[in-house]
Image (tube, helix red, strand yellow):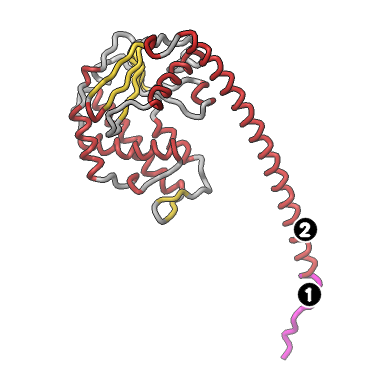
């Protein structure tokens, strides 16, 4: 972030998508009316991440926002969608003109002076082990003690889900510090930035949730996540054992069939070539 030189950026969701795709050998992913292989999809994903990283570096160094970087952001958005939902669309290859125009309008409307920090700026921070336990949790922006979630929805209104998301992040931070640190980060304000309207709504955390109830919820959440993780691990081990037994059974069956085929072949009378 050029306006905040001490900003800390964390790995992009699109980078995780590339890693997931690289580990998906043998799978086929639906795209429209057909299917694509990981090898075919990794190429546009890796290309988008690589070139977007280079473009962002130039932007931070002082270069103006280019059409290319804006277009690359649309490629990255498709990577994000794959990481979060497992779905992939043809837009990974060719972003639409409509989406590109929409993004340019949002960029033009954004007032970066709304986002100020004096000591801390975390871009897309995760919550250490908490992110793994909850199977994916990353905030949008932390400025000093101010946690911000960015919304690009057309609906200029607050939903209960938006509150729950922010409070969930604050609760996670108590036991799984945001940014992956060793101690919880002081979060005293929360807010939502409505990107399409260039509007940042802010609330003191104390006006939204009682401190004692928040601590109790954070403890319950930590215990629940650890419990659910243990259940998933146990289930995975059971499934792996089941699959191992299935593979052994199938291997033994194939070997029996091969031995039987060899015996039949030996017993079969040789064909005479005499006329």
Q: Mark 1 or 2 closer to N-term?
A: 2
Looking at the image, residue 121 lies above or below residue 108: above
Q: Where on the picture, by quarter, is residue 201?
A: top left
Left/right of residue 167 with respect to residue 265 in the rendered view:
left
Residue drawn at point x = 61 percent, y = 31 percent = 232
- Which label belongs to residue 220? none
Is disc 1 surrounded by few (<14), some (14 to 19) or many (20+) residues within 10 Å?
Answer: few
Residue drawn at point x = 50 percent, y = 16 percent = 176
Which span is picked out in magenta?
Answer: 265-275
Residue drawn at point x = 46 percent, y = 15 percent = 173
Looking at the magenta stretch, what is its main secondary structure? loop
Left/right of residue 245 with respect to residue 110 in the rendered view:
right
- Which residue position is annotated with label 2? 256
Q: Looking at the picture, how far across and down is residue 162, in whole percent?
A: 38, 25
- Nearer to me, 22 or 237: 237
Q: Looking at the picture, how far across and down is residue 191, in whole percent?
A: 33, 18
The answer for how far apart the CA atoms under marks 1 and 2 are is: 18 Å
- Which residue position is annotated with label 1? 268
Looking at the image, residue 262 lies above or below residue 272: above
Does the segment drawn in magenta span residue 205?
Answer: no
Is disc 2 surrounded by few (<14), some (14 to 19) or many (20+) residues within 10 Å?
Answer: few
Q: Given contact means CB atoms under 8 Å apart, are the residues at marks 1 and 2 in contact?
A: no
- Nearer to me, 163 or 69: 163
Q: Looking at the picture, how far across and down is residue 265, in whole percent?
A: 76, 70
Give the quadrant of the C terminus: bottom right
Which secondary structure lies at badge 2?
A: helix
Which secondary structure lies at badge 1?
A: loop
Does the segment drawn in magenta span residue 271?
Answer: yes
Q: Looking at the picture, how far across and down is residue 195, in whole percent?
A: 26, 28
Q: Where on the picture, by quarter, is residue 79?
A: top left
- Nearer to me, 218 or 245: 218
Residue drawn at point x = 45 percent, y = 8 percent = 211
């Amino acid at each position: 972030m050029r306006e905040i030189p001490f900003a800390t950026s964390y790995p992009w969701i699109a980078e995780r998508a590339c890693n997931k795709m690289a580990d998906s050998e043998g799978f086929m992913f639906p795209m429209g009316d057909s299917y694509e292989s990981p090898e075919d999809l990794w190429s546009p994903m890796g290309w988008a991440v690589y070139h977007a990283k280079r473009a962002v570096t130039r932007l931070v160094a002082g270069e103006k926002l280019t059409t290319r970087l804006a277009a690359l952001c649309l490629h990255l958005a498709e990577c994000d969608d794959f990481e979060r939902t497992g779905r992939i669309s043809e837009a990974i290859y060719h972003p639409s003109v409509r989406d590109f125009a929409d993004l340019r309008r949002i960029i033009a409307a954004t007032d970066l002076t709304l986002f100020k920090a004096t000591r801390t700026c975390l871009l897309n921070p995760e919550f250490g082990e908490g992110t793994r336990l909850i199977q994916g949790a990353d905030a949008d922006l932390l400025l000093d003690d101010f946690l911000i979630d960015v919304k690009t929805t057309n609906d200029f209104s607050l939903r209960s889900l938006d509150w729950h998301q922010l409070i969930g992040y604050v609760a996670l931070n108590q036991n799984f510090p945001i940014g992956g640190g060793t101690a919880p980060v002081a979060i005293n304000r929360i807010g939502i930035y409505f990107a399409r309207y260039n509007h940042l709504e802010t609330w003191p955390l104390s006006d939204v949730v009682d401190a004692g109830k928040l601590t109790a919820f954070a403890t319950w959440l930590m215990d629940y996540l650890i419990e659910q993780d243990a259940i998933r691990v146990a289930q995975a081990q059971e499934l792996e054992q089941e699959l191992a037994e299935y593979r052994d059974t199938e291997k033994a069956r194939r070997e029996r069939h091969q031995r039987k085929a060899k015996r039949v072949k030996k017993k079969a009378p040789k064909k005479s070539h005499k006329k």
